[in-house]
Image (cartoon, helix red, strand yellow):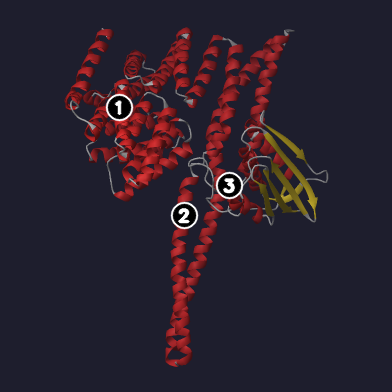
Amino acid sequence: MRLLFNITTLLLIVYLSFGQSDSLLNSLEGKEGKERVEILHQIIIDVWLNYPAQAMGYGLEALEISRAISDSTLTSKSLRLVAGVHYYKGDYDKSLEFNQKALGIALNLQDSALINNGYNNIGLLYYNLGSYQSALEYLLKAKRIKELIGETYGLSTTLNNIGLVYERIQDYEEARRYFEEAYDVAVEISDIDHKLYSINNIGITYLRQGDLDEALKYFRRGIKLGEEIKNINWGAVAARGIGEVLMLKGEKDSIDYYLEKARWASESIDDKKGLAEVYFLLAQNSLNEGDMEEALENLQKCDSWAKQIQVRQQQLDNLRLYASIYDKLGDFINENEYLKKYIELRDSLFQDIVSRNLSLIPLKIKEEQDRFKLSEQQVKIKNQIITNQLFTFIIIITVPLLIVMIILLRKNDRKNKELVRNNEELQKTQKLLITSEKMASLGVLAAGVGHEINNPLNFIKNGIAALAKKLEDSEDEELKSYFRIVNEGVERATNIVKSLSHFSRKGPSTDERCNIREIIENCLLILHNKIRNRIRVITNFTSQGSDLKGNEGRLHQAMMNIIANAEQAINEEGTIEITTRKKDGFMEVWIEDDGEGIPEENLLKISDPFFTTKAPGEGTGLGLFITFSIIEEHGGSIDVQSIPGHGTKFIIKLPL
C-alpha cells in the first residue's frame, strides 16, 4: 500500500508540475533571443523545486543565449536562477559562485532589484555554510534595499532568511518575530509558497523551545497546505517536523509514517539537506527503539549526505549520536574515538565562532547613524556660531541690539551643551562597541562552547569512570592507553574553557593586577588551531617580571586582535616573534610577523573605525580601532612598522 501511494503521488506531481509548464514549453517553439530567455526563466521557476535536473538544462541554455545577445540584465538573472538550482540540489559552493557573479553584474548595472536578490541569496548561502555574521550582513542589506524602494515582493523571503539566522543561534523569540512578519507579508501579497515556508519556520521555533503542541499545530497546517499547493520541498519539511515532535512526545505509532513520507519526498527532488535531516531523525528513532544496527545504518546515510553538502553542524550532531549509540552498545573504544573526533572538529570551528559577532552589527549600524546625526548637528551649530559672530559685530556698533546678542548667546550655549551631550553619547557608543565585540564573541562562544562542551565532557567522564573501574585490577597496557587519551581530552577541554574565561571579565577598572606574559600565552592557546603546523611562534619574555596595572579582560582583547591579525597576514608558513621588556617606566610588547605586510597608504588608516581590506563578510574593520582605544585608555601607545612583502611589527607601550 505504501508503494502504491508513493507511485500514485509521484504520477500526480509529474502531471501537475509539467501540466503547469506545458503551455510555456509549447510557447518556446520558434522563439529566439530575449523572448526565449524570459520564457526559459519562468519554466525554471516552475520546475526547479521538484525537477532540478531539467531546470539546470533550461538555466544553462538561458545563460548561453543571454551572453550571446550581450544582455547584462538577463545574464545576471540567468546566473541567479542557475545558482538557485544548485542551491536546491545542495551544492552550496557552486550556488555561491554563480550568485556572486550575478551580484557583480547587478552592482555594475545599479539595478536595485537584482542587487537585493544577490544580497539575499548570498546571505542564505552563508547561513547554510555556517558563517552567521556574513549571512546577517548580506540579509540586512537586502532588507534595507526593499524598505528604501518600498517594495514588498520578495520581502517575505528576506525576512524568513533573517529569522533562520536567529533560529540557528538559538534566539528563538527574535527568529519567530521575523517569521511572523514574513507570514504577514506573504498573506498581504497572496504568496502561498512563502506563507507555507513561514508556517514551517514558526513551527520549528516552537519545537526548539519545547512547546510541542504549538509546534505540532503549525506543522500540521504546513503539511496540509503543502499538499494543497503540491509543494514537495516544504511539505517534506513539515513531515519531518511532525515526525520529530511525535518522537519527543513518545507517540511511536505514526513516527515511521511521517519520516518515511519526508524521506521519499526529499529523494524525489534530490534534496540532499532534507535527506541528511530525515536520516538523522530515523537514526534517533532507531536508537530510541533499541535497534542499534538500524540506527548506525541510518546515521551513516545521514553522514554521507551531510559531508556531500558540507553541513558542519550536522556532522557535529552525527558524531555525538555515534557516541550515544556506541555507549548503548557498551563499546567504549568506539564511543571515545567518536568523542575525540567531535572535540577535534569542535576545536577547529572555535575561531570561526568567535569571529561571528552577530550582535555587533546592529551597534555598528547605530554608530553610523549617530555619526551622521552628530555631523548634521555640528554643521548646524557651526552655521549658528557664524551668525552669532555677525550679530556680535553689529552689537558693538549699535547698543540696542545687545538684547538680541544675549538671546543668541543663550541659544548658542544650549547648542554647545547639546553638542557636548552628543559627543558624550558617541563616546559611550564607542565604549559599548569595544565591550560588545568581546561580549558578542563570547556570547556566540558561550552558545557554541559552554552549551556544547557539557555533553562531550559528560561522555568523557563516563568513559573515565568505566576505564578506571576496569583498570583497578588490570595490567592491560592498551586499556591504560585509552585512559590516557580520555584524560588528555578532559585536560584539553578544561584548558580551553579556562583560557576563554579571561575574555569575559567585565568592568571599567584599569587598576587590576595583570600579568602580560600570562595574557599573551592565553591568546596563543586560543589561536593554537590556527597556528599549529603552519606558523612558528618565538617568545622572548622579560625576566624582570611581567606585572602591570590595567584591565585584564581588555588587555586580553587587544593582544588577541594583534596576534590574530599577525596570523591572518601569513598566507602559508611563517614566523611570529613576541618580545616583552621593561624600559623607562613602560612595559614594551613587540609582536612581529613575516607576513604580507601593510601598504604604506593604509598605515595611517588602520586605527580608523570600520576600515578593512578584507572581503565583505570577513571583517568589521573594528578590531584595530578597538585595540588602539584600549591601549590609549591604559595610558599607553602603539607604533606600527611595516614593509609590504616582508612583514609587520607592532610595538605596544603600557605604563608600569
Q: Secondary structure at mark 3?
A: helix
Which residue was labeled with disc 2? 368
Which numbered disc flags the more N-terminal residue, 1 or 2? 1
Residue closer to the observer: 654 or 538 = 538
> Is residue 637 shown left or right of residue 610?
right
Q: Residues within 10 Å of mark 2 (few under 14, many from 20)?
A: few
Which residue was labeled with disc 3? 623
Residue type for callout 3: Gly
Which residue was labeled with disc 1? 61
Q: Residue at x 52, y 50 (%)?
A: 610
Q: Secondary structure at mark 2?
A: helix
Q: Specify the quadrant that holds the N terminus.
A: top left
Q: Is residue 416 above or below residue 276?
A: below
> Is residue 370 shown left or right of residue 192?
right
The single residue placed furthest to the right in the displayed view is 544
Residue 219 in view here: no
* Alpha carbon distance from label 3 to label 1: 46 Å
Which numbered disc flags the more N-terminal residue, 3 or 1? 1
> Is residue 67 shown left or right of residue 490?
left
Measured as percent of width and height from the top left, residue 402 is found at: 45, 88
Q: Is residue 324 above or below residue 649?
A: above
Q: Secondary structure at mark 1?
A: helix
Measured as percent of width and height from the top left, residue 269 is found at: 32, 20
Residue type for callout 1: Glu
Q: Residue at x 36, y 47 (%)?
A: 144
